[in-house]
Amino acid sequence: MIARLSSARRGLTVAALGTSQTISWASSYYIPAVLAVPMAQSFDLSPVWVFGAFSMAMVVSAMVGPWAGARIDGFGGRGVLMLSNLIFAAGLCLLAAAPVPAMLYLGWAVIGFGMGIGLYEAGFATLAGIYGKNARGPITGITLIAGFASTVGWPLSGIMLATWGWREACLGWALIHILIALPLNAWLPRGSEALPKPATPEPAGKPPSRFALYVLGFVFAVTWFNSTAMAAHLPGLLQAAGASTAMAIAAGALIGPAQVAARVLEFGLLRRFHPLASTRLAAAAHPVAAVALISFGGPAAYVFAILHGAGNGIMTIAKGTLPLSLFGAAGYGQRLGWLNAPGRISQAAAPLIFGAALTAWGVHAIWLTAGLGVLALIALLILKRN
């Protein structure tokens, strides 16, 4: 009976955190795709200025991530995640009330702070504080739910935009944070009161290798760059390869389901293997997809989208499970913040860099992300499992 209650409690914890993560992603990372153009138009600006503010938000999130992780290590993640909901709501209200572009940028900076303390890294660290090295399953579980953030977020943002306007859409997301996400995070278990500091050895192992930390930081930066570049430019890339507009859009729509399907695979079959094995598999997916696209052109658009989406889906989980497996739960939150900080900065630069490459080289710009993917795979092959 106790085991069944514990299992049920774990399932409810995953459902609550997965739902709050869905809201956090949908109301931050995914709103520029729908709201950036009307935001810019209301200030008589080019949308580039709004996307620039969003890039700034990701840099802010990289700066605060390690601090948030350290707080979670010391006191558990519930309070930090609740604070993130309040900060997200404040930033969204600033956007809604912005009379001038400067206040728009301030709103995005506040949202960036919320992203740094409220997205996956904070969620993963919260679960590590609750479940320790047994957090792999719950981490996979919340990514399964939050994998639908764009599926939920884009239509909901679009409905609010069409019904009321972009300012009211921002207010709507702020209310969703206060009325839904905040109570869900408040319900979470408190977690460990004080996990050991990063320098404290795990009972059965050694302190983390600095080389291994650098390797993982590089891998995560590459994968964040590639995923963000594809999110921003996939339709244009596929059309440059010879796909029609309709085919490019249809192929792009497959990425979300491919990510979720791959996470289901990780939750089932791949969980029998060390996270390093599934991470290597995920890293290989994008380069293989690139070779297919270059070799077969437009007809390979669907194959490219499925392979890229599947690899990205597993890699998202690996960003939480691989450091936990290699280095343990001691100091996990702060370590995860540092490991993902370069990735957040590479995210901010990816749309601009890959956009310039696509303009200059056409479909052959894919060799940029494929080459980076190969380097990431080589780096992972160098790593040793514990």
Image (spheres, rainbow, N blue to C red):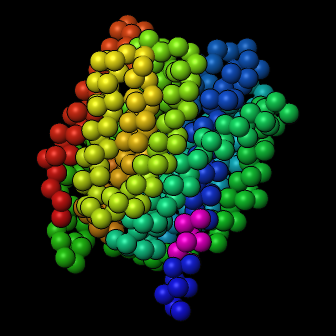
Image coords of residue 105 (percent x, y): 63, 31
- Residue at coordinates 59% horizontally, 65% vertically from top-left? 15
Q: Is residue 293 above or below residue 272?
A: above
**Is 173 situated left or right of 377 in this image?**
right
**Is 98 situated left or right of 216 in this image?**
right
Towards the viewer: 351 or 153: 153
Image coords of residue 53 (percent x, y): 58, 29
- Residue at coordinates 64% horizontally, 14% vertically from top-left? 46
Towards the viewer: 18 or 190: 18
Q: In this view, does 64 lie above or below 334?
A: above
Residue interval drawn in magenta: 9-15
- Residue at coordinates 49% horizontally, 36% vertically from top-left? 255
Image coords of residue 318 (percent x, y): 35, 52
**Is 237 situated left or right of 181 in this image?**
left
Q: Residue furthest right?
A: 164
Q: Quadrant of the C terminus?
A: bottom left
Image coords of residue 243 (percent x, y): 48, 15
Would residue 20 be counted in the magenta stretch?
no
Q: Main secondary structure of the magenta part?
A: helix
- Residue at coordinates 57% horizontally, 39% vertically from top-left? 29
Residue 121 visible to the viewer: no
